[in-house]
Amino acid sequence: MNTNLEGKKIPSITLRTRENGAWKDVTTDEVFKGKKVVAFGLPGAFTPTCSSSHVPRYDELAPALKALGVDAVVCISVNDAFVMEEWGKAQGTSNVQYLPDGNGELTSALGMLVDKRNLGFGQRSWRYSMLVEDGVVTKAFVEPEVEGDPFQVSDADTMLRFLDPKAKAPHDVLMFTKPGCGFCTKAKKLLDDRGWKYDEVAGTPRRLRAISAKGTTPQVFIDGQYVGGCDELEAYLAKQ
């Protein structure tokens, strides 16, 4: 495996992809030439770390990366086009381009192809990330060669900190709500006006008591801390 990607030129390869149920040929020149691209490779679609952490975080941080001049965020995996298309749908991401390297040509050319036959995977990609500028790798984070599936340096936060050590990741907001709740509507507007993304969870009585010992909605958590209801959220945002 090649652990030194920096300075390497992305080879000109045509990849077979699927888009809206139809075949679409995509060349690496189209993806990388004349652009600033963050790309990351991973072992496989629908696998645990790839689905739960690697791809979702790149999707979340893509706007912050693009604010720093990145044109596209690309996920590369040695999977066929059908699998990658369905995985993209299942992930529900909107900021990541999925690039199926079905024959492993691109991954092999980058020196990232590894033997995963012990898992029944055959040849797959090692986990890595790279910054590609006009088709040339200018920075790469390759996971250490240890047993298992290390995930220490190829994450989106590491790439964001490299591009701008002072960059701040978007806030993580979780809000428990109920249908027809006027205070929930107000809380959503407060967050929308700030441009803060949030995940919404149905506030059943048991859930509300378990997380806040209260029965009213909304109940808001920001960056792992309990904020409270709508009034508390408004006061919290006023201090930001």
Image: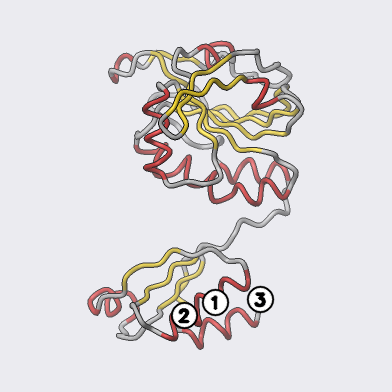
Residue at which label 3 appears: 240
Label 1 crowd (10 A; few <14 / some 14-19 / many >=20)? few
Which of disc 1 and disc 3 is earlier in sequence?
1
Q: Quadrant of residue 32?
A: top right
Circle 1: residue type: Lys
Q: Secondary structure at mark 1?
A: helix
Please state which of residues 141 and 100 is positioned toward the viewer in this rendering. 100
The reply to whether dot 1 and dot 2 touch (C-beta < 8 Å) is yes
Q: CA distance from mark 1 to mark 2?
A: 6 Å
Relative image position of residue 172 (x, y in whole percent): 51, 62
The image's mark for residue 189 is: 1
Mark 2: amino acid: Thr
Mark 3 residue type: Gln
Q: In whole angstroms, how far apart are the C-alphas of marks 3 and 1?
A: 16 Å
How many other residues sit within 10 Å of disc 2, few (<14), some (14-19) or many (≥20)? some
Q: Secondary structure at mark 3?
A: loop
In the foreground, 165 or 73: 73
Give the SS element for disc 2.
helix
Q: Residue, x 65% and y 45% (percent of image)?
A: 160
Circle 2 sits on which residue?
Answer: 185
